[in-house]
Amino acid sequence: MEDVGGWRFVVGVLASVVAIGIGLLLVFAVFDRAAMAWGLFGAFAVFVVLLLIFAWFWDRRQVRDYPD
């Protein structure tokens, strides 16, 4: 019988969890700094602008990859 998951799967999952945790820590740290500097509305406004910029680049890439 073959070991389907094995240690590589476990290490991959743990590495993913650690990477996501560090990423969320950085996002919350930046959001907290923005909230302290510009207030809660300003922090949300910056967050929304960043999401819109990301969405615009994502959409441009999708149009280039799928011209139809």
Image (cartoon, grey):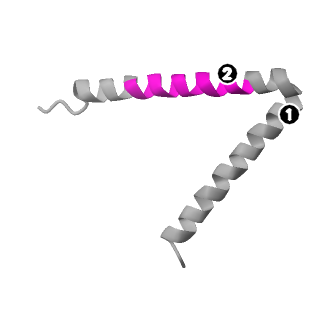
- SS label for mark 1: helix
Describe residue 2's horizontal placement relative to residue 21 as left or right.
left
Amino acid type at circle 1 is Gly
For the image shown, how many numbered marks are present on the structure? 2
How far, Cα to Cα, is label 1 from label 2? Answer: 15 Å
Residue 5, percent from left and from top: 25, 30
Amino acid type at circle 2 is Ala
**2 relative to 62, above or below:** above
Residue 66, percent from left and from top: 51, 72
Is 42 included in the stretch rendered in magenta?
no
Residue 54, percent from left and from top: 64, 50
Residue 46, percent from left and from top: 78, 38
Look at 17% across and 30% down and name the residue there.
Answer: 3
Predominant secondary structure, magenta span: helix
Look at 38% across and 27% down and name the residue there.
Answer: 13
Q: Name the disc covering residue 42, or none.
A: 1
Q: Name the disc covering residue 29, or none.
A: 2
Crowd class of label 2 (few under 14; some 14 to 19; many from 20; radius 10 Å): few
Look at 69% across and 51% down and name the residue there.
Answer: 53
Label 1 or label 2, whichever comes before in sequence order: 2
